[in-house]
Amino acid sequence: MIPDQPETPVPGSGGADKFDDDQYPAYTMGRAADMLGVTQGFLRSLDAACRIITLEDQLHDSERRNTELRSADADLPVTD
């Protein structure tokens, strides 16, 4: 998650502090593609693939956790 950035730069900072932020995109998609000698479409598909892999990992972790919770529920005594 990217932290909220102030709407106006802090006086005297010249906006340079944003370059110290790891979340600040230093290059545009087009500039990065030019630097790497690839197309913007390739970078976008690469980004999408990385997001899919992350989501698959999260799904796997959630399924594992659900299985653990269900087995813990099955071990509880039934009371009416």
Image (cartoon, rainbow, N blue to C red):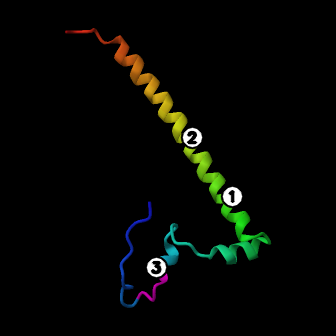
Q: Residues within 10 Å of mark 3 (few under 14, many from 20)?
A: few
Q: CA distance from mark 2 to mark 3?
A: 34 Å
Highlighted magenta segment, given as a residue range: 13-17
Instruction: Label 3, secondary structure: give it.
Output: helix
Q: CA distance from mark 2 to mark 1?
A: 17 Å
The tag earlier along the polypeptide, 2 or 3, is 3
- Measured from the top left, where is residue 49 in percent x and y? 66, 52
Amino acid on which disc 2 is placed: Asp
Q: Write down the residue under mark 1.
A: 46
Amino acid on which disc 1 is placed: Leu
- Measured from the top left, where is residue 24 in percent x and y? 52, 72
Magenta: main secondary structure equals loop
Residue drawn at the location 55% of the way across and 45% of the way down: 55
Instruction: Check residue 68 for magenta coloring.
Output: no
Residue drawn at the location 68% of the way across and 76% of the way down: 30
Amino acid on which disc 3 is placed: Asp
**Mark number for residue 36?**
none
Is the N terminus in the top left, top right, bottom left or bottom right quadrant?
bottom left
Q: Residues within 10 Å of mark 1 (few under 14, many from 20)?
A: few
Q: CA distance from mark 3 to mark 1?
A: 29 Å
Residue at the farthest front position: 80
Above or below, 52 against 38 in this view is: above
Q: Are marks 2 and 3 in contact (CB under 8 Å)?
A: no
Please identify the quarter of the rendering in which residue 41 is found.
Answer: bottom right
16 sits left or right of 10 in the view: right
Instruction: Label 1, secondary structure: give it.
Output: helix
Residue at the farthest left position: 80
Q: Residues within 10 Å of mark 2 (few under 14, many from 20)?
A: few
Q: Write down the residue under mark 2.
A: 57
Q: Nearer the viewer, residue 80 or 56?
A: 80
Q: Nearer the viewer, residue 16 or 42?
A: 42
Q: Write down the residue under mark 3.
A: 17
